[in-house]
Image: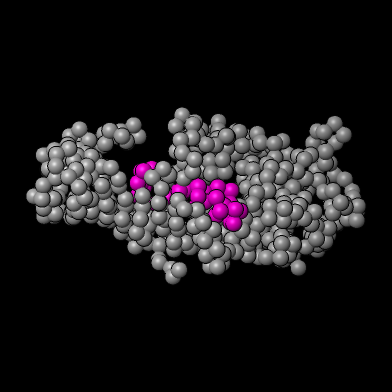
Amino acid sequence: MLLIEEKYKPVAELLLSSGSCPRCVLRLCCVGSSAPYRLPYKELADELWKFLASDGDISPPSKKVRLEDSDGCRTESQISKNVEDIDVSEAPQTCNLCLGILQHHCSTAFVRKIFHKVQSAGYEFQDFVFPVSLPAQLLVREHSAWLQAQQEMRKNGHLLEKADIIQLKEAYKWIIHPMISEELGVKAVSKSLFEVGVVFCHQDTDEDCHFLATVCKDCFKPAKNKHSVFTRMAVVKALDKITDNDFCIHFPWPPSSPKTTCQVVDIQCNHASVFVAGRYNKYSRTLPQTPWVIDGERKMESSVEELITEQLIAVFKADSFNFSSSGREDVDVRTLGRGRPFAIELVNPHRIQVTEQDMKDLQQKINHCDKIKVRDFQIVSREAVAHMKEGEEVKTKCYSALIWTEKSIEKEDLELLNDMKELKIIQKTPLRVLHRRPLASRSRTIHTMKTEYMDEHHFRLYLKTQAGTYIKEFAHGDFGRTVPNIGSMMKTTADIQELDVESVDVDWPPALED
Ligand code: ZN
């Protein structure tokens, strides 16, 4: 029933008498099947005593057990106790190896606590992962037990590799997963978008690890985002390096039996981000793409980003969002045609069962306002969002601009522009964006230009350009920082009065029928 091999008997005997719990005994005795771990605590303890007594040498009623004496000092005493008297199911002494994880934190009460936490958080999910963060000192205690167990095994010519013992996390998973799965009504799996994480700590024994830093200094380097140098990773590294002798001197067997069990610092739920994409038109010349705030002061009342995400956040019940798009337009520039591709990451969404129809309704709601219009609104994968950013530099964009010139426009001026193909220009970072971009010179290509005469001083210019071209600067020259420019080519002063993006030639996201 317990599935402990006979050769591990001395290990079981040693651990049980040193203050380790029955489940940790199974672990150190390399029991690789989950069933014995799931036995009720009392039943498991009884089975263990029976197992130890089975060869007749040891009589179960008499056990050497570690106790706390009345002064709180640990003493080892040979005391007699009937199996029935050791009522481990009631309030077992905290295990010196798992610090109570395999005792108190496997209880139905604890599972119910998790259930309530998950339920009150109000998530939609089909399955879940259950990551557990354990205090690093458990590794030190386990190492200590392994060294001791190894010694015990050697006496009879057996080996015990560290990799053979069952990790605490693994045993805990075997016990707790079926319990939580049953309570939540969905399966605990190894990969899921929904995560219920538990963080344990045990302050009373935090100092267990500290000796490692004096023996293996270079394993413990302060890291910016870690509040302690004693991370699990660092402790694993140090335990790998330290000699058995050094370890036993600094951390003598058996580890102390603490009065308290591990504390649950946090039970945290999180759902992986959902990504939504589409294309937007912007019809206003007073609407920025993202909230425009200067020195804490809001400059424009709304933004494309806000008009789209306000509704989205509400539907998906997300904590926050990240907006990205294929390029951006200035506040006074309209985006026409089929619009500009955008993607929104919805962080920690609580609602995920959103249908195509829901998305259509949402698109319609967003489109009630006259400043923007959204199309091809859909849920996409995280990977697909990368398409939008791919090859942005080589994509083309089409614009239409209203140009003013100081001199009267001649027919030849416009023909000159119409005839130009693949015009190379050099643009220094425009003055208007110098405060947020480094000063640099870059080459861009104006693929084609087409003109339309309006009056003596105005014409419309249709351009097809390489993405990332500064169109306004190409028109007025930016004090000679863009060469050539419309003004220099027409030998006059030119300015741009209106600009519209006519198309952003990125073939993503897939078009949907309206
Ligand atoms: Zn234990």
- The residue depicted at 69 percent of the width and 42 percent of the height is 265
**Residue 431 % position (x, y):** 28, 33
- The residue depicted at 49 percent of the width and 43 percent of the height is 302
Say if 225 sits above or below 337 in the image. Answer: above
For the N terminus, the image quarter is bottom right
The one of 426 and 227 positioned closer to us in this rendering: 426
Left or right of 178, for residue 330: left
Q: Is residue 410 magenta?
A: no
Say if 174 sits above or below 429 in the image. Answer: below
Q: Is residue 317 magenta?
A: yes
- The residue depicted at 60 percent of the width and 53 percent of the height is 314
For the C terminus, the image quarter is bottom left
Res. 42 visible in picture: yes
The one of 66 and 260 positioned closer to us in this rendering: 260
The one of 410 and 252 positioned closer to us in this rendering: 410
Res. 427 visible in picture: no
- Numbered circles on residues, count: 0
Which contiguous range is marked in magenta?
304-333
Left or right of 34, for residue 338: left
Say if 307 sits above or below 364 in the image. Answer: above
Pick out the residue farthest to the left: 412
**Residue 30 % position (x, y):** 65, 59
Pick out the residue farthest to the top: 295
**Residue 276 % position (x, y):** 48, 58
Left or right of 311, for residue 472: left
